[in-house]
Image (cartoon, rainbow, N blue to C red):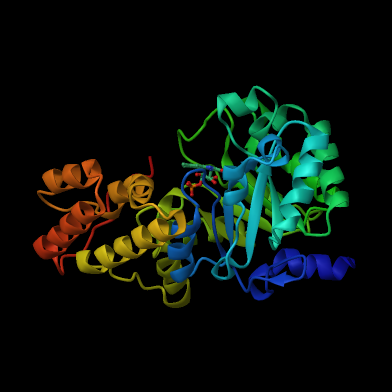
Amino acid sequence: MASIELFLKAKFNYFCAMQIGNIDFGNLPLFLAPMEDVTYKSFRYMCKKYGADAMYTEFVSSEALIRDVKKTKQKMTLFDFDRPVAIQIFGHNIDSMVAAAKVAEEFQPDFIDINYGCPMKKIVKKGAGAGMLQDVPKMVEMTRQIVNAVSTPVTAKTRLGWDEGNKIIVDVAERMQDTGIKALAIHGRTRKQLYTGEADWTLIGEVKNNPRMHIPIIGNGDINGPEKAKQFYDQTGVDALMIGRGAIGRPWIFKEVKHYFATGEILPPPTVQEVIQNVKDQLNISAEWKDDQVRAIFEMRRHFAKYFPALPNFRELRIELLRSVSYDDVIRILDQIAETYHDQRVDYTNVSLK
Ligand SMILES: Cc1cc2nc3c(=O)[nH]c(=O)nc-3n(C[C@H](O)[C@H](O)[C@H](O)COP(=O)(O)O)c2cc1C
């Protein structure tokens, strides 16, 4: 890229549409973070409805993928509403990852993302996910081979480094860019931190403002509402913001953030009745896709637990909802919640992401 173009892109990204390959995401797009056991069809549908500009599948294991595991392939099924959407893959073996990327490509994602951020012990001990931050030459080689093996744009998602003494992201980002990836998402924690402490966006800003960087940088970590989103954007100037846990039980966070950026105003939270309608929609999409109401209820439990923050005297209804295993019971309890709290608004003031 010509240096003037690089300079303009780095300095005035807010005025340029963000791109991954040929896909145009508009100005400062909001990405739904990939989350295992969360970013399946029904939840992606809700986030898209409320303005997520890009989404990812749950991560899929390269080893399972090339062994043709049915559940893994189901995870990669994409829908028209999803687009633009990525399939995220992880693994420790370069050949398997290259083969997996080729299989993923058959599902026609708009981009393929490589997971170099997962901190789970069973994954990092094999050297996959954030474990790759301990072997950067292999991370670079794996990425380069994947980029060369597929024609779909490839991106990566990683963390600041392995631990406090090894926050190597500024160097890693440059080396990853040289492999030909089309964007880099950075979660502002080290592997050692897992999800503890606070995300540190300082180094994300350093990567973004490194004059050598020209690929889009997607900032991630601890966005729990519009004000945090704005604070992190102002601090770093990243090309896109990625929201994970903040969207669970609050898929309208994308709309809230966009409204705040556009007007400086905070939208009022939804009423309980509005929340209930969305919960039912999510449950029904899941039940239809799985062709199994009970499995859909199990899938929804993590979301039920987050959809109704700070309702007074809610404990018993909450327990009943979380214990219920029949579709009719769940609908009855949801209707009871709607009737009890109807136009009361949920309150996110003291909601923790943990
Ligand atoms: C339940 C859960 C599952 C996750 N699964 C993945 C995953 O499959 N791939 C990935 O790259 N990150 C995964 N993450 C990390 C998130 O994508 C994100 O980086 C992290 O939660 C920080 O962002 P947040 O503070 O907005 O949640 C997961 C996080 C959570 C909480």
Quadrant in which the N terminus appears: bottom right
**Residue depicted at x 69% and y 54%:** 208
Task: Give the image location of residue 11, x and y in percent.
Answer: 71, 66
**Residue depicted at x 43% and y 64%:** 46
Q: Quadrant of residue 164?
A: top right
Task: Give the image location of residue 102, x and y in percent.
Answer: 79, 50
Q: Quadrant of residue 22?
A: bottom right
Quadrant in which the C terminus appears: top left
- Side of 146 relative to 287 (left or right): right
- Side of 102 relative to 68 (left or right): right
Seen from the viewer's position, the closer of residues 1 and 26 is 26
Q: Vertical placement of 82 versus 212: above or below?
A: below
**Residue depicted at x 78% and y 59%:** 152
Q: Is residue 163 visible?
A: no
Q: Vertical placement of 338 versus 311: above or below?
A: below
Seen from the viewer's position, the closer of residues 67 and 351 is 67
Q: Is residue 230 visible?
A: yes
- Side of 318 relative to 185 (left or right): left
Task: Give the image location of residue 349, x and y in percent.
Answer: 27, 54
